[in-house]
Amino acid sequence: MPLERLFKALADPTRLRIINLLLEEPFCVCELEAILQLPQSLLSRHLAYLRAAGLVTDKRRGPRVQYSLSTAQPAFELLKSCLRQALRLERVCDEDLNRRRQLRLPCCPPASTGSGAVSGIPMEVKGHENQSADV
């Protein structure tokens, strides 16, 4: 991948917030929606952009898709530790990480069992209306 494509993919505040979270662990769109408090359609568009740039990979987990950072881009691998440090200096990224710690995630079933989800995400988040809240 050309280096300018990598930096173009990182040149958006929403995509940087997504990268900030994915530096910690993989997430599905519904988890990112709850943490970032952004609409699913917007997040899906940015995740598709990051995937097309080779920075994010996706893996189906039952009915949902879990996103993680790619390890296939050598330049991106070199930038990850720098990004982690720089993003911690951004107030909004720090708030996202704090919100992540306060929410009881994940919403998606574990890959090994395929059983029902454990959810701490508010039931009003789209796609979770039918989940049991008493888990």
Image (spheres, rainbow, N blue to C red):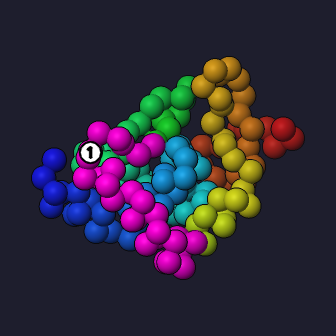
Q: Main secondary structure of the magenta part?
A: helix
Name the residue that disc number 1 marks: 73
Toward the viewer: 80 or 37? 80
For the image, the number of numbered tags is: 1
State left or right for residue 8 relative to residue 132: left
In this rendering, the answer to whether 102 lies above or below 13 is above
Q: Is residue 113 visible?
A: yes
Q: Give left or right: position of 74 versus 62.
A: left
Residue 79: image x %, image y %? 33, 59
The residue sitting at 63% across, 53% down in the picture is: 125
Where residue 71 appears, as percent x and y from the top left, is 35, 41
Tell me which residue sits at (60%, 25%) in the image: 111
Question: Element under label 1?
Answer: loop
Image quarter (top left, top right, bottom left or bottom right) of the C terminus? top right
State the extent of the magenta-drawn residues as a range.
68-94
Please provide percent x and percent y for residue 10. 30, 63
Task: Locate residue 6, reporting x and y percent.
Answer: 23, 57
